Image: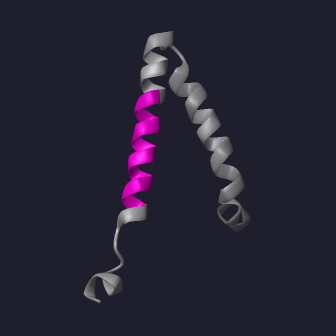
């Protein structure tokens, strides 16, 4: 079972695919497009925050 945790790099795309299929059920095309745009923007903003955060050691210099 511990191998599942080590292979999370391969497991995450599968899980996100399954989640997206579940989230899409029952949504209209317009609502699905809105949800896709929302999550894309959320992911982009989280990536931007992660890249621009300063390490505590770098901020002290």
Tell me which residue sits at (53%, 21%) in the image. Answer: 24
Which quarter of the figure has residue 25? top right
Residue 32 position within the rendered picture, expressed as x and y whole percent measured from the top left: 48, 19
On the picture, is 10 further left or further right than 24?
A: right
Q: Main secondary structure of the magenta part?
A: helix
- Residue found 37% across the figure and 64% down from its top: 52
Residue ID at (48%, 20%): 33
Q: Nearer the viewer, residue 28 or 56?
A: 56
The image shows residue 57 at horizontal and vertical percentages of 34, 87
The segment highlighted magenta reads 37-50
Where is residue 30 shown, x and y percent of the image? 45, 12
- Which residue ends up furthest to the front in the rendered image? 61
The N terminus: image quadrant: bottom right
Q: Is residue 43 magenta?
A: yes
Q: Answer with the quarter of the image where residue 35 lies.
A: top left
Q: Residue at x 29, y 89 (%)?
A: 61
Q: Is residue 49 magenta?
A: yes
- Which residue occupies the foreground of this view, 31 or 44? 44
């Amino acid at each position: 079972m511990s191998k599942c945790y080590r292979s999370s790099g391969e497991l995450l795309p599968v899980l996100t695919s399954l989640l997206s299929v579940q989230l899409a059920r029952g949504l209209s095309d317009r609502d699905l497009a809105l949800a896709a745009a929302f999550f894309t923007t959320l992911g982009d903003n989280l990536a931007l925050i992660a890249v621009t955060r300063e390490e505590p050691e770098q901020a002290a210099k």
